[in-house]
Amino acid sequence: PQVKAFVTQDIPLYHNLEMKHLPGADPELVLLSHRYEELERIPLSDMTREEINQLVQELGFYRKETPDAPVPEEFQFAPAKPLPTLLPPQAPTADGKTAPRHDKEEHPDL
C-alpha cells in the first residue's frame, strides 16, 4: 500500500519521473542516463512512502507543489547532473592497473 500511494499520489508531483506498469513485477525505481541506458535498479517493495519520497529527492528529482506547477529553469533537466569534465589521465597503481575514476555509488549521468 505504501508504494501504491507513492505511485498514485506522489509521482505526478515529480518532474522527469515516470511510472511504467509491468504486470507481476515487483516495484522498483530504474535510473536511466540521458541516453536511456540503465544505471541502477532500486527495489521499492520494503520501503515506506516517506522513504521513497526521501530517496527520490536525494537523487535530485524536483518535486512540484501541484502536478501542473511550472518547473524552474534550473530544474528542467533534473535530476541530470552536469557532464563530468574530462579528468587528466591517472597514473597506474603499483600493480600496473589504472584506478577507477568514479566510485560505484556515483552516477554522473543522473
Image (cartoon, rainbow, N blue to C red):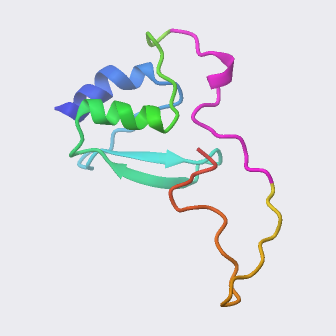
Going 49% across and 9% down the picture, which residue do you hit?
Answer: 68
Tell which of 65 and 19 is nearer to you.
Answer: 65
Please say whether residue 40 is one of the residues in the magenta stretch: no
Most prominent secondary structure in the magenta stretch? loop
Q: Is residue 71 left or right of residue 9?
A: right
Q: Quadrant of the C terminus?
A: top right
Q: Is residue 65 left or right of residue 24?
A: right
Tell me where residue 103 sits by quadrant. bottom right
Q: Quadrant of the N terminus?
A: top left
Q: Is residue 66 left or right of residue 95?
A: left
Going 73% across and 46% down the picture, which residue do you hit?
Answer: 83
Q: Position of residue 21 (x, y in %)?
A: 34, 39
Please say whether residue 77 is one of the residues in the magenta stretch: yes
Going 63% across and 15% down the picture, which residue do you hit?
Answer: 72
Q: Is residue 88 above or below residue 56?
A: below
Q: Position of residue 16 (x, y in %)?
A: 53, 30
Residue ranking furthest to the front: 94
Q: Is residue 16 above or below residue 23?
A: above
Tell which of 50 and 70 is nearer to you.
Answer: 50
Q: Position of residue 7 (x, y in %)?
A: 31, 29
Asked if residue 102 shows in the view, the reply is: yes
Q: Position of residue 54 (x, y in %)?
A: 37, 33
Residue ranking furthest to the left: 1
Q: How many marks?
A: 0
Numbered range of the magenta stretch: 69-85
Tell me where residue 45 sits by quadrant. top left
Q: Is residue 85 left or right of residue 45?
A: right
Q: Is residue 12 above or below residue 31?
A: above
Going 78% across and 77% down the picture, which residue do you hit?
Answer: 91
Asked if residue 18 shows in the view, the reply is: no
